[in-house]
Image (cartoon, grey):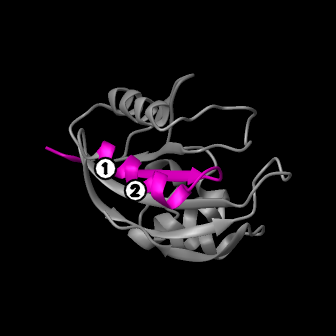
Amino acid sequence: MNTEIYLGLGGNLGDPPATFQQALKKIGHFAKVTKVSKLYKSKPYGFADQPVFYNAAAQLASELSPLDLLAQLQEVEKQLGKKVVRENGPRVIDLDLLVYADEVIDLPELTLPHPGTLDRDFVLKPLADLNPLLTHPAWNGQSLQSAMDQLKECFLIEVAEIIKI
């Protein structure tokens, strides 16, 4: 049985829309990409002195375990040239495993659902494009849409375009 999984894509170096398309193509070798959000531009989060970020989300189906999927996603990042210069700093690509069914995991290498998912518009809005009513047991019944309605800080600038898969 395939598991419903949500992935965040982010990047602000090179050509993020093209990099996202390459990433989704590579992900298609080990998971089925079932939906992709619109592409958003956002102000940098955390470390402000860097280029504007592009953000998107994808819905996946996979039989891989969360840790095996994470390893595959990290390999895609590596193939596409990801290098972490500093936390929340500039990068070619960032693939974040946001939600993996109803799994709750708290390990050094993986936390699910991804911390901060409900607090960041540049994560919430693309996810809400895919499934605004998505909830998770760890969110105490809160949906993506209700979390969007409660956001206090906004990083989103505009919708850039739609990613083709």
Which x, y percent locates residue 14?
Answer: 60, 51
- The disc placed on residue 25 is 1
Q: Which percent across, then down, holds residue 28?
A: 26, 47
Q: Position of residue 83 (x, y in %)?
A: 62, 31
Q: Looking at the rendering, in which quadrant would you find the N terminus?
A: top left
Location of residue 129 in the rendering, given as x and y in whole percent from the top left corner: 44, 72
Q: Is residue 79 above or below residue 130?
A: above
Q: Is residue 101 left or right of residue 156?
A: left
* Callout 1: SS: helix
The residue under the point 40% across, 47% down is 23
Which circle marks residue 61 in the picture?
Answer: none
Examine the image and state in which quarter residue 115 appears.
top right
Which residues fall within the magenta stretch? Answer: 1-27
Q: Quadrant of residue 148?
A: bottom right
Alpha carbon separation for disc pair 1 and 2 = 6 Å
Amino acid type assigned to the residue bearing label 1 in the image: Lys
Q: Which residue is denoted by mark 2 in the rendering?
A: 21
Relative to 143, 89 lies left or right: right
In the rendered structure, does residue 22 fall within the stretch colored magenta? yes
Question: Does residue 38 lie above or below 9 as drawn?
Answer: below
| Point 38% across, 40% down: residue | 103
Can residue 133 be seen from the camera position used here? no
Pick whichever, 154 or 142, lies toward us: 154
Q: Residues within 10 Å of mark 1 (few under 14, many from 20)?
A: some
Compared across the picture, whether 67 is left or right of 155 comes to left
Q: Are marks 1 and 2 in contact (CB under 8 Å)?
A: yes
